[in-house]
Image (spheres, grey):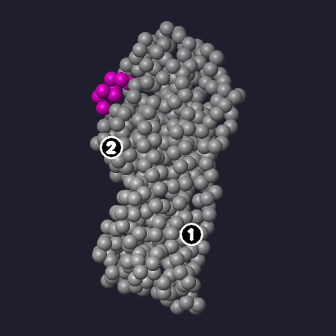
Amino acid sequence: MILLNGSELTLEQMKDILFKNEKVAIDDTAKERVRKSRARVEKIVSEDKTVYGINTGFGKFSDVKIAESEVNKLQVNLIRSHACGFGELFPEVVARAMVVLRLNALLKGFSGIRLEVLDCLVFMINEKIHPAIPQQGSLGASGDLAPLSHLVLTLIGEGEVLRDGQLIAAADVWKEYSMEPVKLRAKEGLALINGTQAMTAQGVVNYIEAEKLAYASEWISAMTLESLRGIKDAFHPAVHEARGFQEQSEVAGRMRDWFEGSSLITSQGDIRVQDPYSLRCIPQIHGASWQVLNYVKEKLEIEMNAATDNPLLFDEDDLVISGGNFHGQPIAFAMDFLKIGVAELANVSERRIERLVNPALSEGLPPFLCADPGLESGAMILQYAAASLVSENKTLAHPASVDSIPSSANQEDHVSMGTTGARHAYNIIANTRRVLAIEAFCASQGVEYRGVEKMAPKLYKQWQQIREIAPAITEDRIFNKDVEAIAEYLMP
């Protein structure tokens, strides 16, 4: 059980919630903050003070005063009108992350929502009630309005739930549990949708998957080093200490650990004096991607615990301020940076694949790792596929955050496009996973030709895992099934 309080949620905890279905509960101190915040909203409504989003319209309609008798209807209308997402649905794991992150943000006590509503979000998480949320339609400011509106539709019994790939009417799900859907009151609709939780949820899943891939890229490239009789000297700690980047030194250290005890790894001068960059510069290239991951992790953990709606209510003199914490620029930049960092792992992996299959570069391995070259093509087209995925990544890596387009009659005249960036980052991660799976498949074949008994003990264990998933190349077959199976193995 993970206690949420709005301030201390970590990516490690999110891993447990998302991939191990760990349950959540609300910390008692957060409950008290929520109650106090809600009391301030009730006071505003009873005193008929004019406050944005409580008794006014939204966006360009912020100057339209709403009668007290209509403030609840205002919130329902907001959700219905803003639930206009399109395209494919977010995966269930991303939808689950959205519910968790929106709940955590509201627990900070600045949003004026009732505790009963938040209890319902807890129930959704713990019972795996995952809203059906279309991926397209968010500008990333004022927050992720369209995706989060689809989340809230589920809450009020008007949307759909995604369960094991099947769509089910939310109203039917609540009936299953003999529960009534939430009836929104003043400010609650706005509090629920005015935030960055779609881009941040996708960003959290992106980071978790990218981190796993970055670690996997090290043992995969170490196996390639064995296949190509790579030179260990370039990984000497003195080389990396001389430059001073911590992540570079850490990658070099983990690489040395992977190929410790290998009889296939060589020293400079044994076969050649130095390796090509795709082998020799693994610590420098992969280390730079780890710098990106560390930056992204820092920004995500801040945003996961941030109040991102508008307006915010503060204790001091019943202060209510309309601000812009819903603007997704910090996460937009982080996701665009992540795209570049992960795409580079694929770029260099594809170059190593080329060296494994090209007889002019592979240090004596069979052409394209064929059992019968000429009659068979072996891994020839696997390199084509890797090249295609890498090239697609290059187009997806174009920064979404450099774009902006005005909305709401120019009231909202600059937006982040952070959700687009997060979605594209996810596509890049999926492509990169397949490129690394191709490298793992080819490297596992390469070490077989060299002699698996000569492998480093830790890499031998990884080779055994790959062989359980994908048999050796003994003749041509449909290799995409092998690659997809290895890619699945590389998932969190």
Name the element at disc 2: loop
Which stretch appears magenta?
27-34
Q: Which mark is residue 450?
A: none
The reply to whether residue 361 is in sight is yes
Figure quadrant of residue 35: top left
In the image shown, does 464 or 335 lie closer to the viewer?
A: 335
Question: What residue lies at 45% left-to-right and 42% top-to-bottom?
Answer: 300
| Residue in the picture at 37% in, 19% down | 36
Q: Residue at x 38, y 79 (%)?
A: 266
Q: Which mark is residue 386?
A: 1
Q: Position of 308 compared to 249: left or right?
A: right
Q: Quadrant of the C terminus?
A: bottom left
Residue 353 position, x and y percent, is 52, 74
User: Does the magenta portion include 468?
Assistant: no
Measured from the top left, where is residue 474 in percent x and y?
47, 87
Q: Amino acid at mark 1?
A: Ala
Observer-nearest of 405 and 131: 405
The vertical placement of 190 against 157, above or below, is: above
Where 247 falls versus 44 (above or below)? below
Q: Residue at x 55, y 42 (%)?
A: 332
- In percent of width and height, residue 185 lies at 49, 22
Residue 226 visible somewhere in the drawing:
no
Q: Is residue 33 magenta?
A: yes
Q: Position of residue 212 (x, y in %)?
A: 41, 58
Q: Residue furthest right?
A: 409
Q: Which residue is mark 2?
A: 23
The crowd level at tag 1 (other Cα within 10 Å; few <14, some 14-19, many 20+) is: many
Query: Relative to residue 213, is residue 297 depicted above or below?
Result: above
Give left or right: position of 460 versus 243. left
